[in-house]
Image (spheres, rainbow, N blue to C red):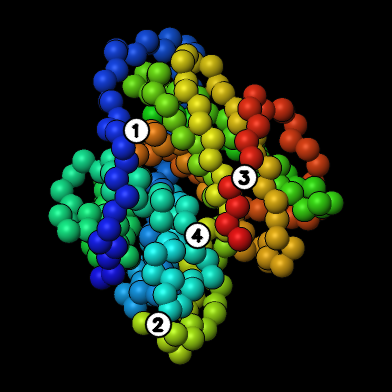
């Protein structure tokens, strides 16, 4: 297990105190939705334990269509080998989990290690612990979604940009008034490369679901009305689009718990043009080169 000993600690704790939320009228509540589970793997090609974890992530997703997988390649093991899918934002996301996670964790390095799985922002599991991961996913699938998510994605060819609209509405009154993070991750799959140095030297690795672009937006639901966000996703022309998919999730910004997730394919080149409905808020992407 690879670990990062020195942690960046946030300056101030976040208050979780809230008053009782307002009720959502029954006739205005969105219909019940199928639960999808966000499964995040924090990984690195500089870690010799991570290839097993990436194979496990692939198996978990291949077995259950309601698993929405993302591999976040951290940058803190980029010596001597630089992971081509790594980015500081991936390490930052793992650090945020370490800060807000309320359950027991290793005292020495917390949740800042590879390989580490996070299931729905609520349960951390060692990245090679298949029984633990399967149990956490089963438990997450039993929870009812507390928000309704829907998304539409179209592309324009010049320049190559995906126009993504995400709409979110409350199902449970428990989410009213709480700040939500709407995350959108463009991810690839089945990419191979040969590692030339480090713990995996002279191995050819297969990357399952590596994050290519990360887009983040914030919203607060203050009533039963649906809210929308729009994202512009620039596309690298060297990528093979038939392997690209987009993971979308709604997450409590303070607790890290994921309320719902969804997964959609990148559309074909023939399906292009602007989204039919304009969103209420435009967001800029945070790119991963």
- Residue holding disc 1: 254
- The picture places residue 138, in percent across and down from the top left corner, at 29, 49
Q: Residues within 10 Å of mark 2 (few under 14, many from 20)?
A: some
Foreground: disc 2 or disc 3: 2
How far apart, in angstroms, are the residues tagged by discs 2 and 4? 18 Å
Callout 2 touching callout 3 (CB < 8 Å): no
Q: Nearer the viewer, residue 60 or 19?
A: 19
Earlier residue among tags 3 and 4: 4
Instruction: Indicate which disc residue 87 carries.
Output: 4
How far apart, in angstroms, are the residues tagged by discs 2 and 3? 32 Å
How far apart, in angstroms, are the residues tagged by discs 1 and 3? 22 Å
Tag 3 secondary structure: loop
Callout 1 touching callout 3 (CB < 8 Å): no
Quarter assignment of residue 90: bottom left
- Residue holding disc 3: 285
Quarter assignment of residue 236: bottom right
Foreground: disc 1 or disc 2: 2
Left or right, 234 with reference to 212: right
Residue drawn where x is 42% and y is 75% of the image? 79
- Residue holding disc 2: 198
Q: Can residue 15 be seen from the camera position used here?
A: yes
Earlier residue among tags 4 and 1: 4
């Amino acid at each position: 297990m690879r670990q990062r000993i020195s942690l960046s600690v946030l300056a101030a704790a976040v208050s979780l105190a809230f008053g009782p939320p307002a009720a959502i009228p029954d006739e205005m509540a969105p219909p019940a939705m199928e639960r999808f589970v966000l499964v995040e793997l924090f990984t690195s090609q500089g870690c010799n334990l991570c290839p097993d974890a990436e194979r496990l992530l692939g198996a978990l997703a291949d077995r259950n269509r309601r698993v929405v997988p993302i591999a976040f390649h951290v940058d803190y093991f980029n010596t001597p080998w630089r992971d081509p899918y790594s980015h500081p934002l991936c390490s930052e996301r793992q650090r945020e989990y370490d800060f807000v996670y309320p359950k027991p964790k290793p005292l020495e390095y917390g949740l800042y290690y590879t390989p580490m799985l996070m299931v729905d922002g609520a349960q951390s599991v060692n990245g090679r612990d298949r029984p633990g991961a399967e149990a956490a996913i089963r438990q997450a699938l039993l929870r009812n979604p507390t928000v309704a998510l829907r998304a539409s994605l179209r592309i324009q060819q010049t320049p190559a940009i995906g126009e993504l609209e995400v709409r979110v509405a409350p199902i449970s009154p428990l989410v009213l008034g709480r700040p939500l993070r709407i995350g959108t991750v463009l991810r690839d799959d089945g990419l191979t490369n040969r590692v030339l140095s480090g713990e995996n030297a002279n191995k050819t690795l297969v990357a399952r679901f590596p994050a290519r672009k990360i887009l983040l937006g914030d919203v607060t639901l203050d009533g039963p009305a649906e809210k929308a966000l729009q994202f512009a996703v620039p596309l690298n022309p060297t990528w093979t689009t038939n392997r690209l998919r987009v993971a979308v999730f709604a997450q409590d910004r303070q607790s890290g718990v994921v309320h719902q997730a969804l997964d959609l394919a990148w559309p074909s080149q023939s399906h292009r043009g602007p989204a039919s409905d304009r969103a209420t808020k435009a967001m800029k992407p945070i790119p991963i080169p």
